[in-house]
Image (cartoon, rainbow, N blue to C red):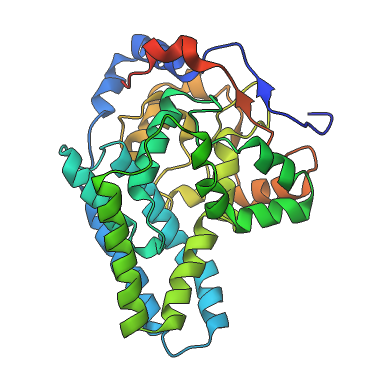
Amino acid sequence: MNSVIKDFQFSNQPEPHKIRTRAILKAHPGVRNLIGRNPLSFLIILFVIALQLFIANLLKDQPWWLALIVAFLIGAFANHACYVLIHEAAHNLIFKSRVMNHIAGILADIPNVVPSAISFRSYHLKHHSYQGDYYLDADLASKWEAKLIGNSVIGKAFWEMMFPIFQALRTPRLKDIPFMNFWTIVNWIVVFGVDALVIIFFGWTSFLYLVFSFFFSIGFHPLGARWIQEHYLIAPPQETYSYYGPANIVALNVGYHNEHHDFPSIPWNNLPKVKAAAPEFYNNLVYHKSWTKLWLKFLFDPKLSLFSRMVRDSKSEITDTGNV
């Protein structure tokens, strides 16, 4: 990237993952054995819920600024793990039953104060099938959003701090994806219900701790670089990037993003095994080693913006959208 870009980059090539999936399975058919579910993820969900509510209770008589600090240092990582587990549930990678995966996702959503697990499922699965399609991929910023934020440090910092709001404002663009269903309502009742209980029994400082944890987990925090890492064009034309660093331990291997897109039916605990089984397909790809370094690069590099993404017309790919 040698200049500031003012629009998305366009590709006339199909998204790269289905092609690589077929090639890997041809060269390493044993990778199929990694496909499955990990019900232990449900225990992690219960642990993180308990941890966040326990910390929130400890902070109930403390000043709000202490809740802010604890949220940045601890709560952000806990809530981020919740999002990873919501992601696992969206792909039905925890239980065989779709209903149980819905329940697992909703429970994992409890510390996030704003219900999004069921909505995320609908939009995220389209992201896999139609990567880069402006009208079907919610992972892409809206054009007005990218123009508003621009290339400045202040604009990008504001975008990160308000990231959940900007994501919600993308939904009207995605007219072909239904926003509401029965499980969405259940999701709202459970999460908003727990919010009310936290305020009633623990107090506002405890609730603020969860709010701060929520915003830090996906926004203005080194963890927020995960959203930049996955598909922002650091080394075009490569459009998906993995992160191989120590934060994967607490982020449940979510950094293995190329591996996940290639095999969305493989649970988080087996994603490193995909790379190990087929190194010749991954070692030649550009990857990230530090979310913190990437976070700062995104903020301060004027050549990077919300337009640093690849888009395509995926209508021709509709017949080839199944998961392995």
The residue closer to the viewer here, 84 or 259, is 84
**Residue that sits furthest to the left in the current view:** 97
Query: How far across and how far down the image is residue 267, in percent?
Result: 31, 37
* Quadrant, the C terminus: top left
Q: Is residue 254 above or below residue 285?
A: below
* Quadrant, the N terminus: top right
**Residue that sits furthest to the bottom in the current view:** 61
The residue closer to the viewer here, 266 or 64, is 64
The answer to whether one can see residue 302 in this image is yes
Determine the residue positioned at 42% across, 79% down.
206
The residue closer to the viewer here, 56 or 291, is 56
Determine the residue positioned at 24% across, 46% down.
182
Please state if 35 lies on the left or on the right of 8 as rendered: left
Q: Is residue 224 above or below residue 110?
A: above
The residue closer to the viewer here, 13 or 94, is 13
Query: How far across and how far down the image is residue 125, in percent?
Result: 38, 32
The answer to whether one can see residue 269 in this image is no
- Quadrant position of residue 93: top left
Query: How far across and how far down the image is residue 223, in percent?
Result: 55, 53
Please state if 8 lies on the left or on the right of 112 as rendered: right
Q: Give the total of numbered labels.
A: 0
Q: Is residue 260 above or below residue 293?
A: above
Determine the residue positioned at 30% across, 49% down.
184
Please state if 63 lies on the left or on the right of 9 as rendered: left
Determine the residue positioned at 57% across, 33% down.
231
- Quadrant position of residue 88: top left
Query: How far across and how far down the image is residue 18, in percent?
Result: 42, 16
